Image (cartoon, rainbow, N blue to C red):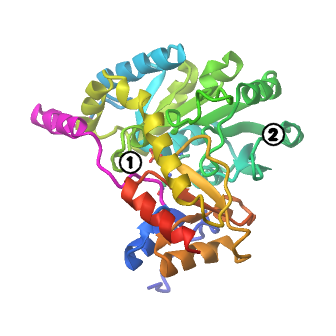
Amino acid sequence: MLTSSQPALVSKLPHVGTTIFTVMSKLALDTGALNLSQGFPNFEPDPVLTDLVARAMRQEHNQYAPMPGVPVLREAIARKTAEVYGISYHPDHEITVTSGATEALFAAITTVVRPGDEVLVFEPAYDSYVPAIELAGGIPVYVTLTPPDYAPDWLAVQEKITDKTRLIIVNTPHNPTGRVWTRDDLNQLAALVRDRNIFLVSDEVYEHIVFDRNGESNRAHHSLMSHPTLQERTFVISSFGKTYHVTGWKIGYCLAPNELTAEFRKVHQFVTFSVVTPMQYALAEYMNRPEPYLELADFYEQKRNLFLQAIAGSRFRFTPTEGTFFQNVSYAAITDEPDYDLAVRLTHDIGVASIPTSVFYHDRNDYHILRFCFAKDDDTLKRAGERLSAL
Ligand code: PMP
Ligand code: GLN
């Protein structure tokens, strides 16, 4: 209760409420609905990995880790990055282990953005970017991605770049749309930033979840580190949560050239100082085998296909998602209700929770599209498909 002597707190984030992920997951729990809303697996990680955590604890890895992350984990990340992308980051001064990608995003944005700086954000956008920009005093400038293909309009990007643009935030594979940037997208971006004082934050938490790689599309994850003009100015961010089915561990990392990492770590050390120790040792050892991340795309492609088969006879319309574990579907043929209302109604009425995509646009563009997470066991996906098909 506010007493007369209490100072009045003026919100620094007046437009921010509880995230849609929390809202929909709670509603799913309260109603007993199948939860295809918040992005997390409803199955367990490899027991080998959890056993490694127990072993690390027994081996007395229970005190503060070094501020940038335990050396063996940074070395494992460096090895993996070199193997997968052919790029070397030095574990001592170019790799930092963070409390999830969320902390890495916050620290990178805080490192770069000063009051009055403009930051380009492609939207729909993952919901943590803009509050971090605003807390740093930056001004978000939006570039809209529109269905069905959500391809960046490079002319629009060019028009939004000004002398005040300090940072562009990229997310590929993209949450919520599943779009995967092409090599041409990277070239277009490079041409725009080449001679400018602009940094990049590249959210690549779904780096290992790209589909239809052998088909005509020739699709692949193109990390921003793979383009030299981009690499030198980019904070590349990933997360073990998505790759090893451990979203609750909240461990991620940031790769950035030496000078960028030095400043990044100044923020990191006072946001969180260091990250949970035994999990870092476990992850370092688990990373010795590449199969878990190399096989992840096939694992999720099978789940995507199962979910799409399960809703093939429904009135929802969709293009198979290119990456991530999210499938967007249009419900325009079923109803013209606002997407938020429909997501809530479907949770109550048919017991399937989803995410309304309008929440990822600052002015709540409603294209009548829902996002479904298919990081769920096959039975859940089939049951959800049956319920959605009955609509
Ligand atoms: N970026 C994107 C695009 C995400 O989807 C998520 C996660 N859910 C995050 C960042 C945050 O990752 P973490 O849970 O490792 O903080
Ligand atoms: N990234 C997850 C999603 O998009 C949710 C993470 C969270 O709940 N903050 O659903």
Q: Which mark is residue 247?
A: 1
Report the front residue among 36 and 107: 36
Q: Residues within 10 Å of mark 1 (few under 14, many from 20)?
A: some
Question: Which amino acid, by three-letter code, is at mark 1?
Answer: Thr
Q: Is residue 289 left or right of residue 183?
A: left
Report the front residue among 38 and 336: 336
Residue shown at the point (50%, 75%) measured from the top left: 347
Q: Is label 1 within 8 A of ligand 1 (CB to nearest ligand atom)?
A: yes
Q: Which residues are magenta?
A: 38-64
Q: Which residue is mark 2?
A: 164
Q: Indicate whether residue 368 is drawn in magenta.
A: no
Q: Is residue 285 above or below residue 154?
A: above
Q: Is label 2 within 8 A of ligand 1 (CB to nearest ligand atom)?
A: no
Q: Quadrant of the N terminus?
A: bottom left
Rendering coords of residue 144 (x, y %): 78, 51
Q: How many marks?
A: 2
Most extreme residue toward the front is: 313
Among the two numbered marks 2 and 1 on one chain, the one whose residue lies closer to the N terminus: 2
Residue shown at the point (43%, 42%) measured from the top left: 242
Say what secondary structure mark 1 lies in: helix
Q: Is residue 79 left or right of residue 236?
A: left
Rendering coords of residue 346 (x, y %): 54, 76
- The Cα atoms of the two marked residues, 2 and 1, are separated by 36 Å
- Could you tell me if residue 103 is visible in this image? no
Q: Is residue 311 above or below residue 302?
A: below
